[in-house]
Amino acid sequence: MTTSNDGSSKLWGGRFSGETNDLVERFNASIDFDRRLYREDIAGSLAHAAMLAAQGIIPAEDLSLITGGLTEILTEIEHGQFEFRLDREDIHLNIEAALIERVGDAGRRLHTARSRNDQVATDTRLFVRAACDETMNWLRELRSVLIDLAQREAETVIPGYTHLQRAQPILLAHHLLAYEAMLTRDTQRFAQARARANVLPLGSGALAGVTYPIDRRAVAGALGFDAISENSLDAVSDRDFVVDYHSAAALTMVHLSRMAEEIVLWTSAEFAFARLDDAFSTGSSIMPQKKNPDVAELVRGKSARAIGNLVQGLTLLKGQPLAYNKDNQEDKESLFDSVDTLLICLQVVSAMLPTLTFDRARGASAAVANFALATDFADYLAKKGVPFRDAHEAIGSLVAKCEREGRTFEDLTLEDYRAAHPAFEADVLSIDLASSLAARDIPGGTAPRAVAQARDAARTRLEAEKQ
Ligand code: ARG
């Protein structure tokens, strides 16, 4: 990075005679991170210049020089041949100054009817829009992985939990599809974030609008924006669309973190429902036997960043008077971090999930252990006309008796059941894991038929979204 601290060389240097303090130059500059917006910045300038020429604000010859120069700069940046300069502060001034070096006065006309304030807002919106699209693609990939896994493990049973206490048997597929449901809502949130971001601020000038006969709708059309902003003060200072991205990202990361926590639990010796593939676990440098779920733990840990970035984005805005303030330069690193964090987590979880192997026998035995069929016995009595509260009490005392005697439901005879409640008949002996699952055959329930329907519906919904 080159530095040349000569105030007069700056594109805004006209009214300055003194040089910028070295520390201030470093403090003020954002080029180290906002260079990432080069594509958006060039796209915005190309659309702006084309509009200026079409409106007769700059000559057609200037447009072709500007277009040629910006296209060369784009290629140079993409080939790592562009020299980013700290003394040129940010991505906007770096590109504009390089353009002027190339094409002279035509380049000096590019900034007509524009301010860096509406320029950076435009670039950031273009960035967020693309980030939403990429995020939604990876969310859909992960949803498809979950649906496939639900199909592969269609018959796998695990205990369902409340309060992390074994509660009732469920299909693993049902559990997996619960995450698919969360990620479907996340996808919707990114679609909404995209729609709100997709509004053109350019044309707002520094804050009050511009004095030239510009055509904002033409620029919006060229850049694929759905609409133009309605208030110039809001347009240059609004970063709600960044907060929208953070907010959707933080919640998605919370969902991934919950899933990661389940993987940590399931692959522990205590649960032992699943095994990690070597490719997705790591060893310990001291304990030779260890196989650690680092990937899942990192996903859980990285959710903290996304939550922190959301808080940073909100806090950044809260004290700002209208309109643009330099505070807003601080929106970018956290935005980039949220996007990068979320995308890598979505990818790594999508890759890891199919490599899990489930211990189906262990899942099934754990699913019925600890009196997990108790509700089914209470429901049995209720269906024979016993008020549910009485049925609950009778089964509760039966569980207590079994616990005292070191027995399980499977050890009980018809006489034992009838001693607990006279409404029990011989068919009570057919209550088992399969009957417990099959009985929950309502939309949204864990019966194999209901889960297969939910899985197929999820797949149809996903395919429709991809159209
Ligand atoms: N680098 C600045 C940012 O990220 C660009 C806008 C600066 N505008 C200004 N008037 N200083 O917000």
Image: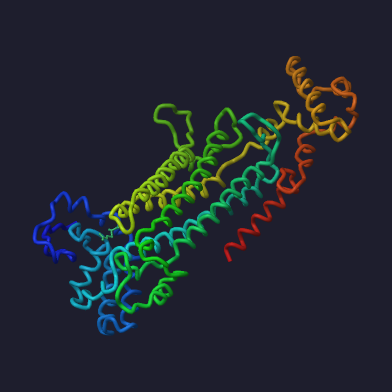
State which quarter of the image contains the C terminus. bottom right
Q: In this view of the protein, which residue sits in the foreground, 90 or 70?
A: 90
* Quadrant of res 223: bottom left
Report the residue at 20% width, 59% height from top.
85
Q: Which residue lies furthest to the top in this view?
A: 404
Asked if residue 190 can be seen in this view, the reply is yes
x, y percent for residue 136: 51, 57
Query: Compared to 26, does 265 lie above or below?
Result: above
Q: The N terminus is located in which quarter?
A: bottom left
**Ligand 1 positioned in quadrant:** bottom left
Seen in the image, is 235 located left or right of residue 100? right
Q: Position of residue 147 (x, y in %)?
A: 62, 51
Q: Which of 418 and 367 is in front in this view?
A: 418
Query: x, y (%) of residue 183?
Result: 56, 50
Between residue 222 and residue 160, name the one nearer to us: 222
- Residue 343 versus residue 463 in the image, above or below: above
* Image-quadrant location for residue 171: top right
Please determine whether, in this image, residue 424 is positioned above or below residue 256. above
Q: Is residue 458 left or right of residue 263?
A: right
